[in-house]
Amino acid sequence: MSETTTLEKAPGTASQDYTFLVGENVYLRTFHPGDEKNATSWRRSIFPKSSELVEKWIKEELPKEGKHKRSHLAIARKSDDVIIGSMLIYNGDVGIRVNAGVDPLYGENGQRWLVEALAIAAEWQVDENHQAKMDTEITSDQEIALQQLLQAGFVETARWREMLDKNGKRYDRILLSYFNAGWVERIGHPMEMELPRTGTGEIRPVPAKVVLDGDPPANAVIVGQRVYLRPEDKKDAEYYEKSSRMEDEAFFDIGRHIFPQAKLEKWITDGTDDDYPKYLGYAVCLRENDEVIGSVCLLDTDFVNRTAETGSFFHESKNRGNGYGSEAKQLLLEYAFDVLGLHMVNSFVYFPNTRSAAALRKQGYRECGRLCWLYPYEGGFGNMVLFDLLASEWRALPRET
Ligand SMILES: CC(C)(COP(=O)(O)OP(=O)(O)OC[C@H]1O[C@@H](n2cnc3c(N)ncnc32)[C@H](O)[C@@H]1OP(=O)(O)O)[C@@H](O)C(=O)NCCC(=O)NCCS
């Protein structure tokens, strides 16, 4: 073997092995063993891991990623081939989502490198591979990145206010999308599409707190005027399964769904033993007879940034549109803000689900943008309208006494 073939490449020359995915300062490449050495710099987590564990992840987990429709890429600096960040690409039903980051220690240079990496990914996936769109996210302290991404053709499609806590200050989480020009020409720009609306749009007073004469209902977490919340129970899965196959409305989700009881049981019990669960689900029960009529939940609960997504589901159409959802949601919000101490919550609604959007508006949520082109819909792509609500806004809502 000649001496030259055993020598490692000189730093700063590796990008010459690529015909694409190379920008002015950075390039994208797959991970390989050895990259674990500076993993704390490029891993996108606030919980660092040892090099041994990251090496194991590179060797054992990365090869399986395709099954989950996702892939990781390293963001490497051209001048010396040092990995300065990474990106995770998810393939959705319509487009892709890219979660990317560069080590914040690189400051403003890091923001510029991040923009370059995202622009390379967008041109590759959207312009060249004809994905309908690419979504990505940054935070409002990344001002340079925001300006440059807008200049590179990304559009700000949503802004969740004060969703991140950094160094004692709150920052917005910003969603940016890069749309395929051909699709925009054919079906129009999703940010210009009219959002259908129902309801009055008026914020209603938060119902007065209930003081009980007697004992609370069994296992009640929080009690309202007509309904109370209690932890979901494996036994509730039987009713959830039955009502899923008896569903008579199809507009509030991407069509109707049918669930095996065992899967519902697993959903209910998964994570319920954890002290800091991501999912907290509560059955909504009628005070008059303890019958379960719905579920409300906190999803993706983040106890570092003190945020969560709220969700609600009333299992039979006869129990929708009667104000139960708003009453139960106010109980959930009291729990989220006053008991868990969350700073803000958010919610996602499919465009045709005007009832859910109307309910959120009456509960005090504010529209904060759109998640565009998520799934095939009526010969084009369907969108979601997004909402957020700060604890301070909820506390300032009108209240019944
Ligand atoms: C979404 C849901 C939790 C809301 O709870 P709810 O008890 O129905 O809500 P409310 O009765 O308090 O408010 C409903 C609002 O929608 C309007 N509305 C009622 N029925 C409607 C219908 N069939 N279509 C459109 N709007 C309707 C009402 O006018 C009301 O607004 P207003 O009081 O300002 O006029 C409940 O409808 C539900 O479980 N739907 C099915 C599952 C779902 O959509 N979950 C949310 C996914 S994001």
Image (tube, rainbow, N blue to C red):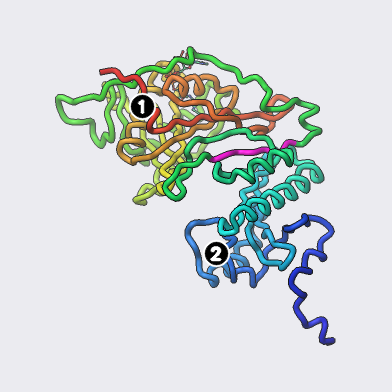
Residue 203: where, in percent of width, then height? Answer: 42, 18
Q: In terms of depth relative to the viewer, which is nearer, 81 or 188?
A: 81
**Looking at the figure, which quarter contains the N terminus?**
bottom right
What is the chief secondary structure element of the magenta stretch?
Answer: strand
What residue type is disc 1 on?
Answer: Gln
Q: In terms of depth relative to the viewer, which is nearer, 12 or 69?
A: 12
At 40% from the left and 38% from the top, the residue drawn is 343
State whether residue 74 is above or below residue 326: below
The residue range painted magenta reads 173-179
What residue type is disc 2 on?
Answer: Thr
Residue 68: where, in percent of width, then height? Answer: 63, 51
In space, the residues marked 2 and 1 are separated at their CA atoms by 41 Å
At 80% from the left and 42% from the top, the residue drawn is 127
User: Which residue in the protein does label 1 denote?
Assistant: 330
Q: Is residue 292 visible?
A: no
Q: Given this view, does label 2 or label 1 mark the residue nearer the observer?
A: 2
Q: Is mark 1 within 8 Å of ligand 1?
A: no
User: Which residue in the protein does label 2 denote?
Assistant: 40
Q: Is residue 170 magenta?
A: no
> Under tag 2, what secondary structure?
helix
State whether residue 35 is above or below residue 220: below
Q: Which mark is residue 162?
A: none
Residue 372: where, in percent of width, then height? Answer: 65, 32
Residue 126: where, in percent of width, then height? Answer: 76, 42
At 33% from the left and 38% from the top, the residue drawn is 231
Q: Is residue 71 visible?
A: yes
State whether residue 384 is above or below residue 35: above
Q: Answer with mark 2 or mark 1, whichever residue precedes in sequence.
A: 2
